[in-house]
Amino acid sequence: MSGIRIYAFADEASGSLEGQIAAMRRNGLQGVELRNVNGVNVSDLTIAQAKEIRVALEGEGLTVWSAGSPLGKIGVKDLFGPHLEKLKRTLEVCAALGAQRIRMFSFYTPGGEDPADYRQLVLDRLGEMADCAEGTGIRLCHENEKGIYGDNAARCLDLLTAEPRLGGVFDPANFVQCGQDTLAAWALLKDRIDYLHIKDAFFADGRVVPAGKGEGHVPEIVADYLARGGTAVTVEPHLTVFAGLEALEKEGGRSAVGAFAYPSADAAFDAACQALKALL
C-alpha cells in the first residue's frame, strides 16, 4: 500500500464530524471526501464552518482531499446561472478546507431523448465551470453517474477530451449500474482518470457490495491505476445497512437481506474500508 492515500465519504459512517473522524481514524485513512457534515452539504458550508472543520481534521492528522459536491446534478435544461454561483461559493469553501478537488457531474438529460442532442450545451456549461476554477489550484473532476450525460465511457472520454481542464473520477459500480463493462471503460478512460471511487456492484440488480465482491473488476482497475502512478482513492461504501440484521441472523434469515448487509452504518463503513485494504 506504499504511496497510496485512502480517503472516504465518511458521512456514510456518521452525520457528525466527530463520528466521521472516529471512523477514519479507526480505519487508518488519510482523510475525507467531504460531502455532508453536521447536517450541511459541503457546497452549503460557510467559510467559518469550513475553517472549523479543517482545524478539527488537521488536529487528528486528517485532510479534506475533495469536495463531494452535487454540482452538475441538475437537468441540462435547468437555469444555469444560480448553479454557477454555487460553484463559485464551493470553490471558496474548498480553499478554506484545503481541498484540492471538487467532484462534479455533467447534468441529467431528458429521459427518452438522445443525449447527443445536448452535447454542445453540456460542453458549454462544463467550459464555464472550468473557467470559474481556473487559477484557483482546485481541480474539477467529473464522475460517471447514472442518468447524466457522462454516464458511459464513450461520452466520458468525449467530455474529458473536449474539456481537458477537467479530471476524471472513475466509479466502477456506477458503470456497472449503467450496464457498462468496467474493463472496457477503464481501457478508454485510464489516461484521463485523476482518482478512483471504490465501490463494486452486480449487473443483475445494481446492488452495491464490498470492493472485489461484485462484477466491477475493482481489483484489476485499482492495480492498474496504481501501476500507472495513481495515488488517491475514495472509499464510497453504499452498502446495505439493515438495523434488524442481528436479530434476523439469529432466526436464520440472513438470505432475506443478502450476504452483504450490515447492522450499522459504522459496520458497513468498516467493511468497505477493509475490503479495499484486502485487495491492496
Image (cartoon, rainbow, N blue to C red):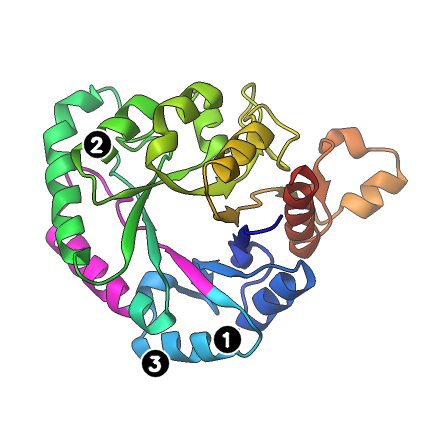
Mark sitting on residue 48: 3
Q: Is residue 75 magenta?
A: yes
Q: Earlier in the sequence, mark 3 or mark 2?
A: 3
Q: Nearer the viewer, residue 186 or 179?
A: 186
Residue 198 in view of the camera: yes
| Among the 4 quarters of the image, the one containing residue 102 | bottom left
Residue at (44%, 64%) from the top-left corner?
64
Residue 51 vertical position relative to residue 152 in the rendered view, above or below:
below
Residue at (48%, 48%) from the top-left corner?
231
Amino acid found under the numbered disc labelled 1: Glu
Camera-nearest label, 3 or 2: 2
Q: Disc 1 and disc 2: Cα gap in Å?
A: 36 Å
The image shows residue 277 at horizontal and vertical percentages of 66, 45
Q: Is residue 30 left or right of residue 265?
A: left
Amino acid found under the numbered disc labelled 2: Thr
Mark sitting on residue 58: 1
Specify start and end residues of the magenta stretch as a single range. Answer: 64-92
Residue 42 vertical position relative to residue 142 in the rendered view, above or below:
below
Residue at (21%, 45%) from the top-left corner?
165
**Disc 3 element:** helix
Q: Earlier in the sequence, mark 1 or mark 2?
A: 1
**Residue that carries the numbered disc 2 in the rendered image:** 161
| Among the 4 quarters of the image, the one containing residue 40 | bottom left
